[in-house]
Image (spheres, helix red, strand yellow):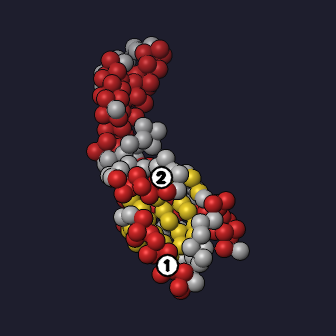
């Protein structure tokens, strides 16, 4: 879709004369139309660059470039242990319970834009990393939508990612503290304070 939009905008900008040189006696209206054409051409080129970078957002085509740069600087912040199914989750909850630790379970998918935003903007924040130091961090990657992925989602009555669940040392989920959707670093830090108080 982004590629088609990019092509449409670039072609339309050419039609408006964005690449055509104006004559000395050009009218104000002709200059205005050319200016609009140049703006449309610029946005069309930004979309084209965004497509090449793997972006899926028409409104933020260069998002993946900034995510990649930030990720390279901070290595995506916190480290999650991947779980594949309910049995692995139960094992991790049991182990955390023996240590008296809380568990954070993050539902993630490669196609989930909010998941990538959480990774780049929230989990990379130093204050969030500090708040999560004593927490067992688990991640269920449901990108493939396999039978095991569906079973995990069904167990917690979720449609899909993004979702973050919290389990106490007693292995019981604290449902009132579920997070569905994106939260920036400050919102997430405040939420963690409420969960762990």
Residue in front for this viewpoint, 73 or 103: 103
> Mark 1: which secondary structure?
helix
Q: How many marks?
A: 2
Q: Where in the figure is residue 40, as x and y percent of width and height? A: 40, 28
Residue in front for this viewpoint, 69 or 180: 180
Q: Where in the figure is residue 51, as x and y percent of width and height? A: 31, 42
Q: Please determine whether, in this image, residue 88 is positioned above or below residue 20.
A: below
Q: Earlier in the sequence, mark 2 or mark 1?
A: 1
Residue beneath disc 2: 154
Q: Residue at x 53, y 69 (%)?
A: 104
Q: Which quarter of the figure has residue 197?
A: bottom right
Q: Is residue 31 visible?
A: no
Residue beneath disc 1: 94
Q: Residue at x 31, y 48 (%)?
A: 53
Q: Marks 2 and 1, Cα distance to the nearest angstrom?
A: 21 Å
Q: Is residue 135 left or right of residue 13?
A: right
Q: Which quarter of the figure has residue 37?
A: top left
Residue in front for this viewpoint, 186 or 174: 174
> Mark 2: which secondary structure?
helix
Q: Residues within 10 Å of mark 1 (few under 14, many from 20)?
A: some
Residue in front for this viewpoint, 142 or 10: 142
- Cβ atoms at labels 2 and 1 below 8 Å apart: no
Q: Where in the figure is residue 34, as x and y percent of width and height? A: 40, 22
Q: Where in the figure is residue 66, as x and y percent of width and height? A: 41, 55
The numbered mark at residue 138 is: none
Q: Is residue 142 left or right of residue 170?
A: left
Q: Is the N terminus in the top left, top right, bottom left or bottom right quadrant?
A: top left
Q: Residue at x 40, y 70 (%)?
A: 88
Q: Please determine whether, in this image, residue 101 is positioned above or below residue 7.
A: below
Q: Residue at x 42, y 65 (%)?
A: 86
Q: Is residue 73 left or right of residue 126?
A: left
Q: Is residue 158 visible?
A: yes
């Amino acid at each position: 879709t982004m590629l088609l939009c990019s092509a449409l905008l670039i072609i339309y900008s050419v039609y408006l004369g964005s690449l055509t040189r104006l004559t000395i006696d050009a009218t104000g209206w002709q200059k205005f139309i050319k200016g609009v054409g140049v703006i449309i051409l610029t946005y069309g080129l930004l979309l084209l660059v965004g497509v090449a970078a793997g972006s899926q957002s028409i409104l933020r085509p260069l998002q993946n470039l900034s995510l990649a740069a930030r990720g390279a600087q901070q290595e995506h912040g916190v480290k999650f242990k991947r779980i594949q199914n309910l049995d692995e989750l139960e094992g991790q909850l049991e182990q955390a319970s023996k240590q008296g630790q809380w568990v954070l379970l993050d539902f993630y998918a490669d196609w989930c834009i909010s998941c990538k935003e959480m990774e780049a903007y929230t989990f990379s924040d130093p204050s969030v990393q500090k708040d999560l130091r004593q927490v067992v961090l688990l991640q269920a990657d449901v990108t493939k939508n396999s039978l095991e992925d569906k079973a995990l989602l069904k167990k917690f009555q979720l449609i899909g990612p993004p979702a973050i669940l919290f389990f106490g040392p007693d292995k019981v989920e604290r449902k009132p503290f579920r997070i569905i959707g994106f939260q920036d670093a400050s919102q997430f830090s405040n939420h963690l304070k409420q969960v762990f108080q």
